């Protein structure tokens, strides 16, 4: 069995850092390290093509897109981000009004 774990962390608006590791319970005779790495690189390169073709500006309005059950973590993140933006906007508005008085 091979478990390839991949995590991406945004570094900037257009760049992410990818961390990967592989856990396996077989031997080199069963599957070589080189073949596992080659397979994973192929998958990552295919993913890069797809991700590079998508719009990096995700709409905060979750009704602007169609969703599947697997989108739930993203929907939760959208809601949390929208709430943070609303709180920040309210805080800035209150600070502006206080400065005018």
Image (spheres, grey):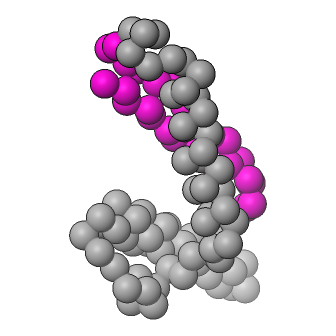
Q: Nearer the viewer, residue 15 or 49?
A: 49
Q: Position of residue 35 (x, y in %)?
A: 55, 27
Q: Residue at x 62, y 39 (%)?
A: 41
From the viewer's perspective, tell me whether residue 25 is left or right of residue 90. left
Q: Residue at x 54, y 37 (%)?
A: 39
Quarter assignment of residue 33: top right
From the viewer's perspective, tell me whether residue 62 is left or right of residue 51. left
From the viewer's perspective, tell me whether residue 7 is left or right of residue 45. left
Q: Is residue 71 above or below residue 18?
A: below
Q: Residue at x 34, y 13 (%)?
A: 26
Q: Nearer the viewer, residue 15 or 100?
A: 15
Residue furthest out toward the front: 29
Q: Magenta span: helix, strand or loop, mainly?
A: strand
Q: Position of residue 74 (x, y in %)?
A: 40, 65
Q: Residue at x 29, y 64 (%)?
A: 70
Q: Position of residue 87 (x, y in %)?
A: 49, 71
Locate the C terminus and report the quarter of the image it occupies: bottom right
Q: Is residue 28 magenta?
A: no
Give the total of numbered labels. 0
Residue furthest out toward the bottom: 64
Question: Can residue 34 be seen in the rendering of this structure?
Answer: yes
Q: Position of residue 91 (x, y in %)?
A: 57, 72
Q: Nearer the viewer, residue 71 or 31?
A: 31
Range of the magenta residues? 1-26
Question: Can residue 86 be seen in the rendering of this structure?
Answer: no
From the viewer's perspective, tell me whether residue 97 is left or right of residue 28. right
């Amino acid at each position: 069995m091979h478990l390839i774990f991949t995590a991406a962390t945004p570094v900037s608006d257009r760049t992410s850092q990818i961390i990967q590791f592989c856990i396996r319970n077989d031997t080199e005779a069963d599957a070589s390290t080189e073949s596992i790495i080659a397979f994973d690189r192929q998958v990552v390169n295919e993913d890069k093509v797809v991700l590079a073709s998508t719009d990096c500006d995700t709409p905060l309005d979750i009704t602007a897109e169609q969703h599947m059950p697997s989108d739930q973590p993203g929907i939760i993140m959208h809601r949390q981000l929208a709430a943070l933006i609303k709180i920040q906007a309210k805080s800035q508005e209150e600070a502006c009004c206080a400065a005018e008085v």
